[in-house]
């Protein structure tokens, strides 16, 4: 879907199909450009990317025919959320099985990858267009510096009151500090 200057692929959110092989190549390219993911083994793409492409739980944004942003998300139930928050998440639970990515209503952003410096622009695009009517959470990935924290987000179409109701309906299953602000 064309949104402003961007081509946005978000099959589950926007309802448009995408070529999984092309999407995989684009995400692999973004991983190679990311300082944090660059050192990962190619095989990690199989566990960290393919499940999201298969379930269509991703958002991939192109600008001028170049991939610039990738986001993956999960819809956890309370039990899976607890496993996610308890484990050093690598896509697999302590029993060696992959965590279910779509078994509840607790919306979690798992990967936010904008290695070319488009993070602020993409946050605005997500807030205004793609995640307009959603509330979601994400783990703060600098927990080694600040301790584990959870970030809360809401799209522009969600009022503060609606967001408060969502947070109350889906409280964190593990006692962690939360910081909330608009996506």
Image (spheres, rainbow, N blue to C red):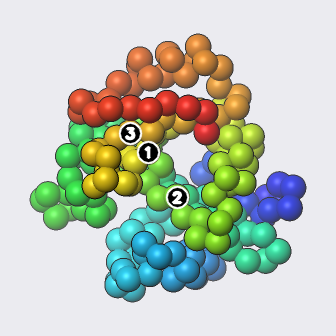
Q: Earlier in the sequence, mark 1 or mark 2?
A: 2
Task: Tell me, yes or no, whether the two marked residues, 1 and 3, touch with CB atoms within 8 Å.
Answer: yes
Q: Position of residue 120 (x, y in %)?
A: 67, 53
Rendered residue at 38%/54% (across/down): 141
Q: Earlier in the sequence, mark 1 or mark 3?
A: 1
Q: What kind of element bears circle 2?
A: strand
**Can you identify the residue that label 3 sits on?**
150
Q: Which quarter of the figure has residue 160? A: top right
Horizontal arrangement in the rendering, residue 81 relative to residue 30 (left or right)? left
Could you classify mark 1 by the number of other residues whose Cα lies within 10 Å: few (under 14), some (14-19), or many (20 or more)? some
Q: What kind of element bears circle 1?
A: strand
**Can you identify the residue that label 2 sits on?**
112
Q: Residues under labels 1 and 3: Cα distance?
A: 6 Å
Q: Position of residue 74 (x, y in %)?
A: 43, 49
Q: Earlier in the sequence, mark 3 or mark 2?
A: 2
The N terminus lies in quadrant? bottom right
Closer to us: 22 or 114: 114
**Can you identify the residue that label 1 sits on?**
138
Rendered residue at 48%/22% (across/down): 166
């Amino acid at each position: 879907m064309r949104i402003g200057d961007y081509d946005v692929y978000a099959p589950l959110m926007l309802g448009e199909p995408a070529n999984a092989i092309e999407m995989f190549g684009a995400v692999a390219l973004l991983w190679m450009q990311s300082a944090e993911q660059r050192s990962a083994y190619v095989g990690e793409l199989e566990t960290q990317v393919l499940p999201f492409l298969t379930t269509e739980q991703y958002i991939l944004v192109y600008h001028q025919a170049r991939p610039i942003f990738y986001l993956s998300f999960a819809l956890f139930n309370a039990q899976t959320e607890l496993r996610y928050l308890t484990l050093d998440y690598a896509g697999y639970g302590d029993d060696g099985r992959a965590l279910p990515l779509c078994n509840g209503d607790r919306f979690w952003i798992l990967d936010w990858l904008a290695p070319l410096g488009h993070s602020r622009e993409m946050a605005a695009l997500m807030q205004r267009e793609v995640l307009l009517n959603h509330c979601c959470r994400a783990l703060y990935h600098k927990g080694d510096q600040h301790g584990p924290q959870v970030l809360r987000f809401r799209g522009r179409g969600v009022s503060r009151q609606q967001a408060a109701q969502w947070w109350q309906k889906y409280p964190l299953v593990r006692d962690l500090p939360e910081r909330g602000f608009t996506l």
